[in-house]
């Protein structure tokens, strides 16, 4: 059971997000330094500009870094030149796609927090151009390419001018691999399909030569998160052997119409052979700042020790439970064994989440209410789960609050053992 859902939902309750926060119906903005400046007086002109696409396919070019770190194919009018930034340790190249502005491409030598990186890039764009009046999130899309999740972010911005409204669009694509990070951006209204097609070509053709060996997970799951119909990010789980589970999330949490706050999280769970949790590590990065760094460890029988920081404040304590805190894998096996064939049966266990209570465990219950449909309660929070009958993995998690619904759908399950 992906435990990190509770971290997200607690934050959403605090933020008080609304269902329309991720959709911008009125298009506004552009960058007079680099992008195309257009004065528009009618809504249909705006719609046409932001919907335009290239009519012809672009030729495929193969490029390689001088140090042989990467080899990749791109769709571009001409072959790009690769430049390496030694100080910041990334490669860059610009792809001419037949538009006024080229698509800028960056390849870093290691992965980064995607949500915080996207917001940092937007903030830098705004700070480097004083004529930009405002910006809004037009659309966020999350998905999976080559077995890894991605962000596709479209920003609309408005430029101050005494001649009328000037609109622009800045588009980002962000994609982590175990050995690298891919970032693309384009500062020009429209050509979204062309931009994504270039990103897809790069992702699917990129070959990295690090000389390192990366452990293949025994199980790899990816969920896409949304509020109502609007994407907010993804959750990824990697399971190594019977004892280690690593859960990562990147989310754009709405904090007002067209605005968002990025939250990147990592949870590491270590368990013993019986499925009892021995250690958990929680790290949360909000807007690029570490806001939570907690370690919880089983020190004796059902006694646990907690240490770390929340919002910069040190905490340290111990707590006890009457039964061991069990692992994610153990919960799944208990669901399969006790719940899937027993309607109205309830499974109870202890659960630790520093976002809900950093000083102790809370009780969690899961009840079979209709075949594969389960109801989970963790403290004051309630979720509805649709469980896969073969492996007891949640296929869909739905958490209602007010008029909204936070939903996570399983989109990839790989290396199931």
Image (cartoon, rainbow, N blue to C red):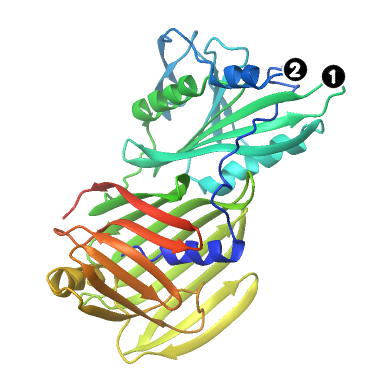
The numbered mark, 1 or 2, whose residue comes first in the sequence reads 2
Residue 417 occupies quadrant: bottom left
Residue at left offset 56%, top offset 40%: 23
Residue 20 horizontal side relative to residue 385, left or right: right
The extreme right residue here reads 162
Within 10 Å of the Cα at label 2, are there few (<14), some (14-19), or many (20+) other Cα atoms? few
Q: Position of residue 54 (x, y in %)?
A: 49, 11
Residue 176 visible? The answer is: no
Say the numbered circle drawn on residue 39.
2
Is there CB contact under 8 Å for labels 1 and 2?
yes
Q: Residue at x 45, y 45 (%)?
A: 229
Q: Judging from the image, what secondary structure is the residue with disc 2 in?
A: loop
The 10 Å Cα crowd at callout 1, few under 14, some 14 to 19, many 20 or more, is few
Distance from Cα at disc 1 to Cα at disc 2: 8 Å
- Horizontally, is 256 left or right of 395 in the view? right
The label shown at residue 22 is: none
Give the x, y percent position of residue 412. 28, 46
The residue where tag 1 is placed is 163
Foreground residue, 320 or 407?
407
Q: Is residue 125 above or below residue 328?
A: above
Q: Quadrant of residue 343?
A: bottom left
At horizontal 56% and vertical 21% (from top left) the residue drawn is: 190
Which residue is at the front of the view, 333 or 174?
Answer: 333
Query: Residue 171: horizontal and vertical position, in percent?
Result: 57, 30
């Amino acid at each position: 059971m992906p435990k990190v859902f509770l971290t997200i939902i607690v934050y959403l309750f605090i933020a008080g997000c609304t269902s329309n926060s991720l959709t911008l119906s009125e298009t506004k903005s552009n960058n007079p330094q680099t992008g195309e400046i257009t004065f528009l007086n009618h809504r249909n002109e705006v719609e046409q500009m932001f919907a335009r696409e290239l009519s012809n396919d672009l030729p495929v070019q193969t490029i390689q870094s001088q140090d042989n770190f990467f080899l990749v194919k791109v769709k571009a009018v001409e072959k790009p030149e690769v430049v390496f930034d030694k100080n910041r340790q990334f490669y860059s190249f610009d792809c001419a796609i037949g538009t006024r502005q080229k698509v800028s491409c960056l390849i870093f030598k290691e992965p980064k927090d995607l949500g915080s990186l996207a917001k940092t890039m937007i903030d830098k764009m705004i700070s480097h151009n004083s004529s930009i009046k405002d910006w809004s999130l037009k659309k966020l899309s999350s998905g999976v390419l080559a077995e890894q999740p991605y962000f596709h972010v479209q920003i609309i911005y408005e430029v101050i001018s005494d001649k009328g409204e000037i609109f622009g669009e800045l588009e980002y694509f962000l994609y982590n691999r175990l050995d690298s990070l891919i970032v693309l951006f384009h500062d020009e209204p429209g050509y979204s399909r062309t931009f994504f097609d270039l990103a897809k070509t790069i992702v699917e053709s990129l070959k990295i030569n690090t000389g390192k060996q990366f452990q293949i997970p025994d199980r790899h799951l990816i969920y896409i998160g949304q509020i109502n119909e609007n994407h907010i990010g993804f959750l990824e789980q990697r399971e190594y052997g019977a004892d280690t589970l690593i859960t990562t999330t990147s989310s754009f949490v709405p904090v007002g119409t067209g605005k968002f706050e990025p939250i990147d999280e990592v949870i590491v769970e270590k368990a013993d052979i019986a499925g009892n949790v021995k250690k958990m590590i929680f790290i949360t990065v909000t807007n690029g700042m570490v806001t939570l760094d907690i370690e919880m460890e089983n020190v004796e029988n059902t006694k646990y020790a907690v240490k770390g920081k929340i919002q910069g404040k040190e905490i340290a304590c111990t707590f006890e439970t009457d039964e061991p805190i069990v692992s994610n894998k153990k919960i799944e096996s208990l669901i399969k064994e006790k719940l899937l064939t027993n309607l109205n049966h309830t499974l109870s266990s202890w659960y630790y989440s520093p976002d809900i209570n950093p000083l102790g465990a809370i009780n969690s219950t899961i009840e079979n209410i209709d075949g594969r449909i389960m109801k989970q309660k963790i403290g004051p929070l309630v979720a509805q789960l649709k469980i896969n009958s073969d492996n007891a993995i949640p296929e869909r998690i739905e958490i209602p609050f007010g008029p909204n619904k936070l939903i996570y759908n399983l989109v990839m399950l790989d290396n199931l053992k």
